[in-house]
Structures are given as structure tokens and as C-alpha cells.
Amino acid sequence: MGVEMISMLVASLCTLLGALPVLLIKNLSHKGRDVLLAYTAGVMVAASTYGLIPSALKLSNVPVLITGILVGTVVLMLLEILLPHQDLEHEVEKVSRSSILLFIIAMSLHNVPEGLSVGISFASDYRDLGSIVAFVIGLQNMPEGFLVALFLLLQKVHQLKMMILVSVTALVELLAAIVGMWFGQFFSNVIPYGLAFSAGAMLFIVYKELIPESHGDGNERVATLSFIFGFISMIFLTDIMR
């Protein structure tokens, strides 16, 4: 197994790594949940603004970046409109199996451009681009995995089934990365669009879901501090690996 394949595998498995802490949660208070969601939001914003967006600009220009971000935002918005949507409410009733399945489908579709970006980056002629993109995507996969697992936990999904469903989203990203690496030489111009798409999709999730949910029970101040700490943590980790 080559270095590229190992890097793509690790980046995808970070989704499962992010989901593991949820297995330890028994009784999650409103305040604790708000803190975790805000921290996740901070990590995802930093991954977008400090990792994905600069990488997209390095390979292209502002019009390409704006296009990718807008496409990512619109796609996530359409998914929210077209698919039955369940917010991360604090006291939520158990939703139907079909709604859970559609949620997993939506998150899996979100992972496709991320995987393609990693694979195509490894196939490109830009030195070390693949490693940087894989690292950034892997780091932001951890809060995404946590978010998916937290949603399933609130729906009273069994822990084993929860991890299987999270694994599905990780597998989709890995397969997309493999496809991207195989056909990267034909789609090298897609790399900046894929990076910007992922950034736009993450920013949509943060502003539409995570920030409002973390400010719903009077925990705005501690949630804000948690958001900033998550943001700084991601910047620190990314800077170390560069």
C-alpha cells in the first residue's frame, strides 16, 4: 500500500476517530452539548478559512474560489430542502428510519467532493499538495464524524449501528479519493473547485446548524469561548503539520 493510499485511508478514518468520543457519552447535558457543538464549529471554520480556502487560492483565483464556495453552499441548501430534515434539537423525539437514512445520504454526498479533492491532489504535479489536503480534510473529518455520531445518539441509535453508519460516510469519501487519484490527471483543474466546495459546505453547516444549536439554551458565552478554542486548536494543529 503506497503512501498516497495510506494518507487517503487515514483521512477517511478520521471520521470514525471523531465519532469515538460519542461512545463514552451517557448523559449529555444541554451545556455540555452546546460546548461540543461550538467547538466542532470552530474547528470546521478554521479548516475552511485556514486550510481549504488558502489551498484553493494557491491553485486558482478568486472567481474559482467564489464559484466553488457558492456551489457548495447551494448544494447543501438544496439537500436540506429536498431531503426530510431533522435539526439537532436538545429534546428530540426519535425520528423514522428513513429520515436517519436520508441524513446519512446527505452527509455521504457532502464527503464526495472532499474525497475527490484529496485523490486529485495526490495525482497533481504540485509538490506536497496531496499531503496538505489530506491532513486538512482529515482534521475536519473528526468534527464531522462527531456531529454525525451525536445526531444518531440523540435518535437513540444503538452504538454498533451508529458506528456502522458513520463508517459508511467515511467509506464514501475513501472511494471518492481513490477515484480522484486514478483519474486525477484528467481532472486536475477540478482540485480548487473541490476544495472551495468543501469549504462552502462546511461554512453552511456551521452557520445554519451548529452555531444556532449551540446558542439555544442560555449558554452563549461558554459556547462562544468553546468556538474560539476550537478555531485556535485547528490553526495550531495545521501550522504544526506544515
Image (cartoon, rainbow, N blue to C red):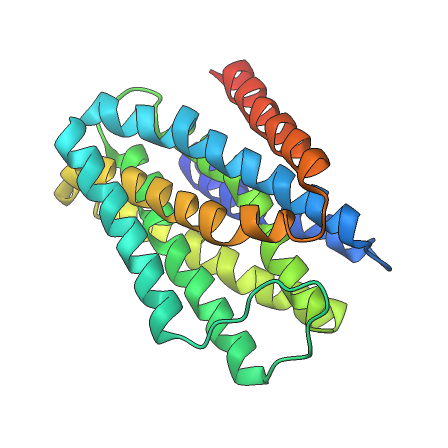
Q: Which picture quadrant has residue 120?
A: top left
Q: Residue furthest right?
A: 27
The front one of 224 and 172 is: 224
Looking at the image, residue 213 lies above or below residue 8 = below
Q: Residue furthest front?
A: 218
Q: 220 left or right of 175?
A: right
151 or 120, which is in the foreground?
Answer: 151
Picture quadrant of residue 186: top left
What is the x, y in percent for residue 157?
71, 73
Q: Is residue 34 shown to the viewer in this render?
A: yes
- Where is residue 50, by image quadrant? top left
In this rendering, does residue 144 appear at all? no
User: 99 left or right of 189?
Assistant: right
Residue at position x 52%, y 18% from top? 241
For the point 23% across and 50% down, the residue is: 71
Q: Where 40 falls versus 57 (above or below)? A: below
Residue 31 at x, y percent in the picture: 77, 47
Q: Is residue 164 left or right of residue 85?
A: right
Badge count: 0
Residue 99 is situated, as x and y percent measured from the top left of the image, at 52, 79
Q: From what the image shows, is residue 188 above or below residue 207? A: above
Q: Position of residue 82 (x, y in %)?
A: 34, 74
Q: Residue at x 58, y 83 (%)?
A: 97
- Please give the name of the residue rendered at 41% of the width and 54% of the height, measured from the top-left corner: 111
